[in-house]
Image: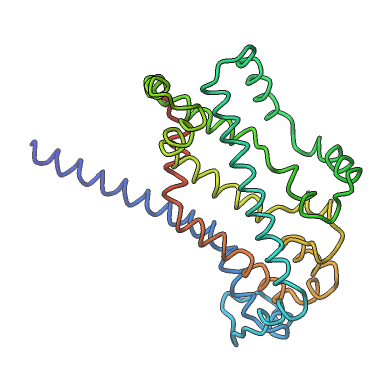
């Protein structure tokens, strides 16, 4: 009787696992299908794409001409360089601001600290679209339109990233801090030698997330730049569409999108474990 119950439990477990994997596989197909369609469309010729009455899921005559056109017909290489500069500079400044702010809120004792942090968190409730006009007017009045400084400055502070780091820093035992102070360690040295190494998974995570955020930026760069030589990749692809060939030659536009997406996909695949580890650690205190 016990053996029958064990076999029955094992069978139910296998059925449940099979159903779970089937549902996950089905969901994966739904999520990945747009990427697959994007890639196969980029491999179709202009004539093949426009000659299809019903979109086919396999290109009949694959070609890489669309990828050549994406770099030949527009300065896509310049857009990549602009985006790389913007991403590196913004991420580096964001890390400096976030680490110092999180350290101040988690470790330094000053009057009104908790109230200031509460008000700071309240900023998360304000949609970024509400302040974009104010930022635009400020940057314009400072003469920073069509400059990297105008692109970068409004993005160097993030309430969410500061909060995430603050929670990590606050979870570090106070005994380490007091022991360091007894040894004559300054606050800044304690931050560099103790807090940052301990919180490195979270720092790596917010770095990767910020890189992805910068690479995908569209609204602010589109608003603050009208010089084609200062466009980022997202704006450059839109310029293709507005310029005419993007609307008429969808395969070439898809090829440009594939080229732009590859760095982010590779970045996520390489660091996916660190991202999950950092987010999980950020949500656990104590």
> Residue 16 lies in what quarter of the image?
top left
> Residue 231 lies in what quarter of the image?
bottom right
Extreme-top residue of the structure: 111
**As rendered, which of 105 and 260 lies closer to the eye?**
105
Above or below, 49 against 145 in this view is: below
Q: Is residue 21 left or right of 54 when viewed as pictured? A: left
Give the image location of residue 25, x and y in percent: 43, 57
Extreme-bottom residue of the structure: 61
**As rendered, which of 23 and 205 lies closer to the eye?**
205
**As rendered, which of 184 and 226 lies closer to the eye?**
184
Give the image location of residue 213, x and y in percent: 64, 49
Q: Residue at x 39, y 19 (%)?
A: 182
Q: Is residue 70 left or right of 146 when viewed as pictured? A: left
Above or below, 238 against 119 in this view is: below
Give the image location of residue 50, x and y in percent: 74, 80
**As rendered, which of 179 and 212 lies closer to the eye?**
179
Above or below, 18 against 47 in this view is: above
Give the image location of residue 193, x and y in percent: 43, 36
Q: How many marks?
A: 0
Q: Residue at x 57, y 23 (%)?
A: 105
Q: Is residue 181 left or right of 107 when viewed as pictured? A: left
Q: Quadrant of the C terminus?
A: top left
Q: Residue at x 57, y 25 (%)?
A: 104
Above or below, 24 against 190 in this view is: below
Q: How is the image coloured?
A: rainbow
């Amino acid at each position: 009787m016990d053996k029958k119950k064990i076999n029955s439990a094992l069978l139910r477990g296998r059925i449940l696992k099979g159903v779970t994997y089937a549902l996950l596989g089905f969901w994966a197909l739904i999520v990945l299908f747009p990427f697959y369609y994007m890639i196969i469309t980029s491999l179709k010729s202009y004539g093949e794409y426009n000659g299809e009455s019903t979109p086919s899921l396999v290109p009949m005559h694959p070609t890489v001409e669309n990828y050549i056109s994406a770099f030949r017909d527009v300065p896509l290489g310049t857009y990549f360089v602009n985006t790389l500069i913007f991403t590196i500079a913004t991420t580096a400044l964001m890390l400096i601001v976030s680490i110092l702010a999180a350290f101040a809120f988690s470790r330094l004792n000053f009057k009104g600290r908790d109230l200031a942090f509460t008000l700071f968190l309240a900023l998360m409730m304000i949609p970024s679209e509400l302040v974009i006009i104010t930022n635009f007017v400020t940057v314009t009045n400072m003469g920073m339109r069509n400059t990297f400084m105008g692109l970068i400055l409004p993005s160097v502070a993030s309430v969410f990233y500061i909060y995430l780091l603050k929670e990590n820093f606050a979870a570090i035992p106070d005994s380490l801090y007091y022991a360091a102070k007894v040894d004559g360690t300054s606050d800044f040295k304690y931050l560099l030698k103790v807090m940052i190494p301990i919180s490195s998974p979270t720092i790596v995570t917010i770095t990767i997330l910020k890189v992805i955020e910068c690479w995908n930026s569209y609204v602010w760069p589109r608003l603050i730049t009208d010089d084609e030589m200062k466009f980022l990749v997202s704006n450059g692809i839109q310029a293709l569409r507005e310029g005419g060939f993007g609307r008429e030659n969808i395969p070439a536009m898809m090829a440009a999108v594939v080229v732009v997406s590859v760095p982010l996909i590779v970045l996520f695949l390489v660091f996916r474990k660190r991202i999950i580890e950092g987010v999980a650690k950020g949500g656990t205190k104590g």
